[in-house]
Image: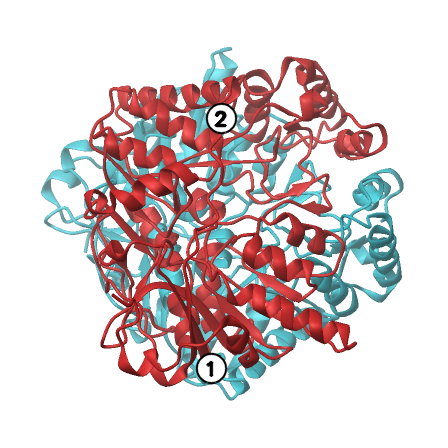
Chain colours: A cyan, B red
Amino acid sequence: MSRIRCPILSTKVVTAQQAVTHIQSGDRVGMSGFTGAGYPKKVPGALAERAKEAHGRNEDFGIDLWTGASTAPELDGVLAEAGVLRRRLPFQSDPALRRAINSGLTEYVDTHLSHSAQQAWFGFYGPLNVAVVEVSAILPNGLLVPSSSVGNSKTWLDLADIVILEVNKWHPRAYEGFHDVYYGTRLPPGRRPLQLLDPLQRIGDPYLRVDPHKVVAVVETNAPDRNLPFKDSDDGSRAMADHVVDFLRHEVSHNRLPENLLPLQSGVGNVANAVMKNLTHSEFEGLTAYTEVIQDGMLDLIDAGKLSAVSATSFSLSAERAAHFNQHIESYKGRILLRAQEISNHPEIIRRLGIIAINGMVEADIYGNVNSTHVMGSTIINGIGGSGDFARNAFLNFFVSPSTAKHGVISAIVPFASHVDHTEHDTHVLVTEQGVADLRGLSPTARARKVIHRCAHPAYRDRLQDYFDRAVAAHPHGQHTPHLLREALSWHEHFQEHGQM
Amino acid sequence: MSRIRCPILSTKVVTAQQAVTHIQSGDRVGMSGFTGAGYPKKVPGALAERAKEAHGRNEDFGIDLWTGASTAPELDGVLAEAGVLRRRLPFQSDPALRRAINSGLTEYVDTHLSHSAQQAWFGFYGPLNVAVVEVSAILPNGLLVPSSSVGNSKTWLDLADIVILEVNKWHPRAYEGFHDVYYGTRLPPGRRPLQLLDPLQRIGDPYLRVDPHKVVAVVETNAPDRNLPFKDSDDGSRAMADHVVDFLRHEVSHNRLPENLLPLQSGVGNVANAVMKNLTHSEFEGLTAYTEVIQDGMLDLIDAGKLSAVSATSFSLSAERAAHFNQHIESYKGRILLRAQEISNHPEIIRRLGIIAINGMVEADIYGNVNSTHVMGSTIINGIGGSGDFARNAFLNFFVSPSTAKHGVISAIVPFASHVDHTEHDTHVLVTEQGVADLRGLSPTARARKVIHRCAHPAYRDRLQDYFDRAVAAHPHGQHTPHLLREALSWHEHFQEHGQM
């Protein structure tokens, strides 16, 4: 049976090549997609071809691209390689796009993921010309069944002048019922409280809405999501996961957390998967998650009967796990809800529910300032994503990283962060494979002693302690956050000049 | 008529010297007080005397002190000078205490003001032994009428093992009706939405509650609040206020703000007062405020009929304005509500109402990272206060500073912030007397060009541009946030060594 059941919209089926004739150079284009799930599969490639042809004729062709978060080679990759992306927000993780940003070809506006939809509504980014949104089906009445992510699709569909839909039948038709799209958003001063009290509560519709008259093209696809290869946890990830879970156990034993914890959020990556795996084999029961992304480990936790409810905005699964999920999708219904990212990452909900937030970091300084985005101050890796939304508003937050990178030549614990994404006011617990530093309620100097002692790699510990001791000695009237400014960034300089810190 | 009408509590009236016998060395003590308003006037001094006597006998005597925010010489001042304060949170601005922190005698935990109450409830700071809270009256049934601030008083009264009350009849008896104390707070997972939709809406009680059996002492006082001397705006403040108000006008004309704006928040200081003064003489009508602190300028704006509703947690008035307010207090009733700081600064409410946040800064770097707390990296001035609560969650935020300090030897715009309290992801508009840099929706390099051109002082502009140009040239693969790490903090180093940047 066709996935396009709406009489009006079924007349608009065209090829991707035909669809992209509606996108003009200079347009602001909002596309679906979050962590490699639910992004359009064909239109971006056709757009890249169109742009390359224009470039071949020595014509300018560039757009501003807004998405949910990171996408895939078939979207960010092809458009970056074709030199189409002038400005990009709110998050990316694509190698080709990263090169374009770091070589100055693309302007990147690295934005809190909960802020992107509202700032578009506020008019901070200018008007949106085109939305390109993947869905899994179109109902007879024109309602859209989203696919493997919601992200900012609701906002792009509402704001754009014209809409291109991709209907991807690779996604199970049974995605209907997995989404909760809140249509109560307003501009201030008309906003109302979000009446969401637990992770699985519905406050919206299972469907995206679109004005059919704005839809200029519908493209049929049958293509898989990006699907990150799953890497088995290494010793370091397992050690960090042990530290996190032991810390949670410790908090429960001191009555600072309930026995079934509080809703979990975890960033994307190996450590997150390792934490989930560790919880799968733990004594914890009746867990819930209120997070951005559902990775393999979280599905395993559901399968193990440990995790009863997951709210997110997207999946990010390995190929094997995606195939398994698609085959057994019905058995997950009622345990998983995908929401718009302005809700999955909303400060109001994160603070109310009391989230336990676990996110990776690039480096932390001895006082607890965390860099999540940059290498050596200048070069962006991915972006802040939702880590700021969750960390700031969490009941308890963890920032996690191996204590060294690149086989030991870089220390993740440094005297002075070369870029700050989470300030000393926001970080609760730092974790490396070496151990855990609980920074809650501590002054900066008390934090420094703990971070150096508990988290730094032994190869760097003495040098960090020496920096700290000399900074303390140098500033008799600057004992709150003592720094030697001449040396503060010298570890990073030394790496740039000599290939090691 | 006595201000202490409760039969049980009236039997507990003692001197401050008797009251402080209930406070032991090692205690965690929560006191009322926010920006020099509503703090206990006598007990801290008596405690300082008790500690000095103990010190004279070579006995240890120290406490952890928690308040709402900054207090006054009679509280932070005397306790810091007596060497009583081991640990202090969540904010301070006292010269003697600042010296104690910066000389390493007091550990200071500089905390988002909306986080302090909940983190105390979460158990992150340990149990609270004693609460010392100023009120303006005790009703026959034991309910407490707060005075000129609410701050964290509700939380300290709830959490503390024992309570000492100060009843200060300097405050008008007519304070009854000016407060809204929300008693619906819960620990996760039991939290509910805050059903607050506009600045003047009541969601709580006009009174603080206390278990009378926990009250060990009631002390009578008749003493004024701190009362900051009012300084007339200088040219720089007036220029910055003009820039802010012109920017608001511009946003209204582009339909990004309603004609009566959105609720205002402004930090403490001359620029805030100048903005209020400017608004007083502007075309704007029907303004509201949802803020932390009510300064002189905001009362003037009420008197001018421009400001119809103010929610805050505290006053911070000049002596003249406080006298005027106390005399005419009835005429402000129904236009002003004081709330607990966890509500006045709550991310949920700030984001919902769409606050326009105006806060001072110490410095900003060219990419928009803002330092609100430290001088030259090591030395703390006051603290982050509520600036993070408001800036992160605001509809629109301004960070404001003169472009230079200390008669021009320090630039407020620097290559690299020597401390980061608000990250590049959080800052919208930077303002100096030189001009306005609107950073919304811009990449870091586009921000840098604007900040240098619009906000830097001409004496530093070329050097900033030169730093930026050379950083761009030095990093062909680091064009997102180009920095010269060896020079990044060199302006601050140069100031430390040569007395000028």
User: Relative to A468, is A94 above or below?
Assistant: above
Location of residue B40 with respect to A243 vertically, above or below: above
Separation (CA) of disc 2 from disc 1: 64 Å
Q: Amino acid at mark 2?
A: Val
> As shown in the figure, which amino acid type bears the numbered disc 1?
Asp
Residue B131 in picture, x, y percent from top left = 47, 72
**Mark 2 = which residue?**
A84
Quadrant where the N terminus of chain A sits is bottom left
Q: Nearer the viewer, residue B305 or B260?
A: B305
| Residue placed under numbered mark 1 in the picture | B161
Query: Residue at the top extreme?
Result: A58
Same-subunit check for callouts 2 and 1: no
Res. A165 in view: no
Is disc 2 in contact with disc 1, using a CB cutoff of under 8 Å?
no
Residue shown at 39%/59% (left/top)? B342
Residue B422 in view of the camera: yes
Rendering quarter of residue B10 = bottom left
Whole-percent x, y for residue B215 in the image: 40, 80
Q: What mark, if any, has residue A132 been given in the picture?
A: none
The kind of secondary structure element at disc 2 is loop
The residue positioned 78% from the left and 54% from the top of the image is: A406
Number of disc labels? 2
Question: Is disc 1 surrounded by few (<14), some (14 to 19) or many (20+) residues within 10 Å?
Answer: some
